[in-house]
Image (spheres, grey):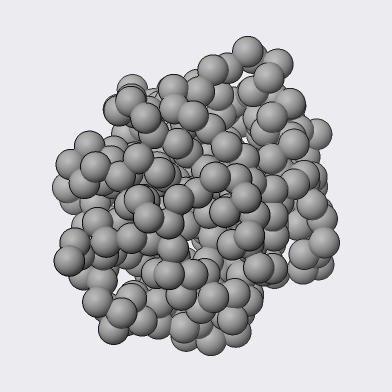
């Protein structure tokens, strides 16, 4: 069992701390890829999982999951990540195709392989922001597979608790052109002040016609769910104590803040998309997903 029992914010790579959560999502995507009714496919995901000592023994196929779909971690939670991947794939492709943006910024990109998987229109640039150790591991694995991105891909190694604007600008991001931003599975790991800075900064850097999707958790006290099957299974089966990695302080109202800044916002539960796609997690008792919301925001053209 891999231990992440203290809130180790200084671990840089995927071997522990918050970086290991990128492997959790990758393993979930690997399993999703091989479901007969997959919502998203990521052929790179299993290679990340196998390459990292922390996750080398985790399942990457549905038949390797003990109890199958009844397993709270590799069944329901993994399906949640599969659904989230699909919904944000659809959002980002819709935004570049219809909205015309050609810059995509993945905040806390982790092992997201959208730059390699999606069918991008010509001229797209995908900026991937994460900490240096995570991006170095990702590079090593993708390089070993001779993977070729389907858009221009620019990695930006920087900590999102610091001032990351200079790093993104230095990487070539153009504030005069519209952009699409994703913060997928990220904000609840950041201090509230870093979340506020991130939302304010996206507003500042995003020209009219830009779009942003992000995930938040609305529960006032996440510890009330400490005995939920999802958190306990994640802790017991792979040693990741998510509640220890989340920043438990009261969160800002980021969707509300964007609305005040003039963005149009839509807030959905994941279950809305389960119903839309006909598969995915549904509400249950003592549900750690109860407060999860996916927020879709557009900055109107003037
Ligand atoms: C749960 S993973 C999600 C990764 C990716 N967005 C996905 O959905 O596959 C969270 C990611 O956020 C990154 N992250 C967390 N805190 C960060 C910080 N302060 N600066 C940069 N990245 C951070 C982690 O390294 C990790 O890759």
Residue 284 relative to residue 276: left or right = right
* One can see residue 277 in this view: no
Residue at (27, 61) in percent of width and height: 208
Residue 272 lies in what quarter of the image?
bottom left
Residue 282 lies in what quarter of the image?
bottom left
Q: In which quadrant of the rendered image does the N terminus lie?
A: top right
Residue 20 relative to residue 61: left or right = right
In the orientation shown, which residue stands out farthest toward the top? 146
In the rendered picture of this protein, how many numbered marks are placed on residues?
0
In depth, the one of 123 and 80 nearer the eye is 123
Q: Position of residue 56 (x, y in %)?
A: 73, 30
Residue 10 relative to residue 262: left or right = right
**Is residue 50 positioned above or below 95 on the image?**
above
* One can see residue 151 in this view: yes
Q: Position of residue 159 (x, y in %)?
A: 69, 60
In depth, the one of 208 and 256 nearer the eye is 208
Residue at (59, 81) in percent of width and height: 193
């Amino acid at each position: 069992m891999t231990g992440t029992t203290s809130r180790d914010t200084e671990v840089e790579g995927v071997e522990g701390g918050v970086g290991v959560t990128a492997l959790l999502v990758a393993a979930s995507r690997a399993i999703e890829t091989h479901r007969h009714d997959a919502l998203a496919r990521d052929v790179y995901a299993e290679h990340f999982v196998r390459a990292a000592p922390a996750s080398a023994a985790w399942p990457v196929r549905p038949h390797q999951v003990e109890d199958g779909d009844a397993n709270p971690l590799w069944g329901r939670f993994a399906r949640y990540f599969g659904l989230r991947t699909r919904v944000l794939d659809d959002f980002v492709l819709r935004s570049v195709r219809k909205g015309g943006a050609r810059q995509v910024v993945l905040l806390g990109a982790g092992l997201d392989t959208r730059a390699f998987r999606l069918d991008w229109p010509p001229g797209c640039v995908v900026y991937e922001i994460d900490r240096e150790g995570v991006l170095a591991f990702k590079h090593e694995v993708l390089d070993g597979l001779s993977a070729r991105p389907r858009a221009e891909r620019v990695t930006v190694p920087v900590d999102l608790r610091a001032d990351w604007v200079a790093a993104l600008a230095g990487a070539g991001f153009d504030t005069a052109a519209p952009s699409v931003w994703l913060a997928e599975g990220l904000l609840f790991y950041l201090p509230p002040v870093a979340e506020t800075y991130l939302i304010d900064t996206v507003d500042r850097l995003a020209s009219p016609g830009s779009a942003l999707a992000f995930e938040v958790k609305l529960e006032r006290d996440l510890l009330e769910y400490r005995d939920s099957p999802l958190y306990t299974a994640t802790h017991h089966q792979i040693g990741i104590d998510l509640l220890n990695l989340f920043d438990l302080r009261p969160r800002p109202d980021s969707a509300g803040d964007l609305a005040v800044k003039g963005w149009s916002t839509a807030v959905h539960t994941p279950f809305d998309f389960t119903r839309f796609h006909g598969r995915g997690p549904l509400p249950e008792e003592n549900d750690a997903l109860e407060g999860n919301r996916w927020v879709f925001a557009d900055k109107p053209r003037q």
